[in-house]
Amino acid sequence: MKAACVENGLVLVRELPDPEPGKGQALVRTHSCGLCASDAHFISGGQNVIDLSRKMGGPYAALHYERAFVPGHEFVGEVLDYGPDSRRSVKTGRRVTSVPIMRQGGTHAVVGFSHECPGGCGELMLLDEDFLLEIPEGLPDDHAAMIEPLAVGLEHARRGRPEKGDAALVLGCGAIGLGVIAGLAMMGVGPIVAADFYADRRDLALKAGAHIAIDPRETDPYGPLPDFGGRRVNLIYENVGVPGMLQRIVEAAPFDGRIVMGGYCMEQEALFVFAAQNKRLNIQFAGGEEPQDMDLALRSIADGRLDVTPWLGGRVGLGGVADAIANLSGPGTPVRTVVDPRLL
Amino acid sequence: MKAACVENGLVLVRELPDPEPGKGQALVRTHSCGLCASDAHFISGGQNVIDLSRKMGGPYAALHYERAFVPGHEFVGEVLDYGPDSRRSVKTGRRVTSVPIMRQGGTHAVVGFSHECPGGCGELMLLDEDFLLEIPEGLPDDHAAMIEPLAVGLEHARRGRPEKGDAALVLGCGAIGLGVIAGLAMMGVGPIVAADFYADRRDLALKAGAHIAIDPRETDPYGPLPDFGGRRVNLIYENVGVPGMLQRIVEAAPFDGRIVMGGYCMEQEALFVFAAQNKRLNIQFAGGEEPQDMDLALRSIADGRLDVTPWLGGRVGLGGVADAIANLSGPGTPVRTVVDPRLL
């Protein structure tokens, strides 16, 4: 098959052997796959993730930075076949997505961050048949590719255990931040304050359910909220994933504030513990979506509760992946660029 | 009055003006005051605390590293007098302790980290009369000085919100760690695993209620616990307060582990956020004791539930404070050295 690979920090299109489905695995032809900031972060910080995964144990331990792997964990594709002794739970020809997890004995690989389980930037993928989520007919491929990033945001939202009386701040309105907003809105949390540098992202935040959207360079996100009786945010969601965010939030958060760290930062953060102690803060590290989040994301997109049409804006073939990953953020960039590996 | 002062990182005995009690303040003659690792940490890292407190707002913002202040926040003393319009809630001549907090308008100072509110390393102190806690007759001064550090540990213990099924690890068995163990034991948490490099501290940990006490250089504190069905710790209390502890705990903690950061580290910590995300960890930063913790600490010491006699082992006058602060930890050092400022 053809695939865009990450190899030693470079993105290259290569011809690779077709993957062969094992027991309990489905072989899938990719139709669309979103490109995520994690893909870009891995190119610069991936060695840190590999090193620490080897030290701590974890699914990235088997990765070799200098060996090719096929990225892409926000995928949708059509079931072509199954490995031996499979339940064949979804009919061939139907479209599926899945949590990007492949069980391997007692452990698991992350699809799109593994040499054995190519991600959605290749023509073919292997998926764990127990995790397949069938896509309803009529839902376009690129919309279906947004299920996974939305599910990540929904997981982050609930991981903060919002309660009545919480005022939430969502820092960063990329796909994950927008998903957090949608999740908080579904849970009835309010007010939800969205903060992003870019006007187009702030518009999307309001559409996703934020009550207020601000440019944090112009308005202090931690200040009193005039439209909400002067209340201040106390439940802060980090979805930017660049170094320095953690300490900045700790310095700005209120006493007894709760922080959910969603942005997957692969560089080292610096933190003054006493600063967090003086405010008795709590930090919950978000762990990534679970099947329940995927299910809710699928239903929310399919029934129109969340319109992801404005998230989409770029569509490339395999030859466009390198450029797209190099230009994921900045003013005017779409929330998600998707790759269709059937195109070159 | 005479006092041992901290000034520009040095500990010096000085003659200072006697403090004069204002409205709502009691004037107290110090009988005994414990020396805490925070006092030592401030000498090296205090400027970090001051700088960040100025940036974030906080009680240390008014401190000047190069100006003298009187440390000591684990004090007991005798009420000499009150400021104007006071309730005189505790009779003069009776002994008191207090949370080391002095309200000042809408904000507060920390007694022992303030130019206005001298700590227990001086002959005289000012205390907020609403926070006075009377010491029962018969409780020795030095035992009463252990109420505050015990209260800190009790606060940390409850801040971790232990639940049935939690297995706790207490890292560092100084006064705070021992207080955490005592608090967990009172809440019925088990097993409680105590970890400390020194055998004498491990003995005290067992006396305080730990079920197991290990040297972490010899036994992995995160490994299966043979006497408890192979369970592993999942609720981890950090009471060491040296840089590097946070990342080390993050690397060793189990999936869904909860960490309570108690040690007051004034140096910058380095943290890989993704490592904590991969395990979906929660970090609760402990905020220091509240009056309820002081009350429970007093009752626990007074009724013999926790015998702090073996915590005590050093007693110095003002002239001995500098040496004592320089030698707070290490094998064979007592859990607490106390200063009696009536002695030179």
Image (cartoon, coloured by chain):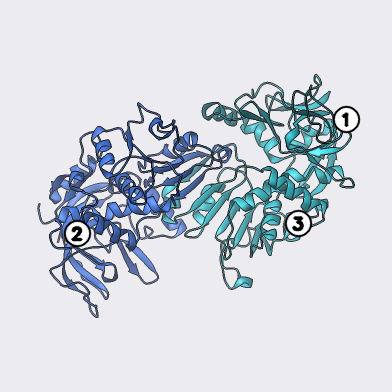
Chain colours: A cyan, B blue
Going by the picture, which residue comes out furthest to the top? A17
**What residue is disc 2 on?**
B76
Q: Nearer the viewer, mark 2 or mark 1?
A: 2
The image quadrant that residue B193 belongs to is: top left
Q: What residue type is labelled 2?
A: Val
Q: Is residue B177 above or below residue B139?
A: above
Q: What chain is tagged by disc 1?
A: A
Disc 3 designates what residue? Answer: A204
The numbered mark 3 sits on a residue in which chain? A
Judged from the image, the secondary structure of the residue bearing numbered disc 2 is strand
Residue type at mark 3: give it: Leu
Query: Toward which corner of the image does residue A106 lie, by quadrant?
Result: top right
Q: How crowded is mark 1: few (under 14 residues within 10 Å), some or many (20 or more)?
A: some
Residue at the outermost bottom position: B85
The answer to the question of whether label 2 and label 1 lie on touching residues, with beta carbons closer than 8 A, is: no
Quickly name the residue at label 1.
A344
Residue shown at 73% from the left, 35% from the top:
A130
Residue farthest to the left? B343
Q: Where is residue B213 in the image (x, y as percent from the top left)?
A: 32, 35
Task: For marks 1 and 3, give the CA distance.
Answer: 31 Å
- Which numbered disc, 1 or 3, marks the residue that appears first in the sequence? 3
Q: Looking at numbered disc 1 in the image, what kind of residue is underneath it?
A: Leu
Does the image show residue A225? Answer: yes
Quadrant of image for the N terminus of chain A = top right
Image quadrant for the C terminus of chain A? top right
Q: Which chain carries label 2?
A: B
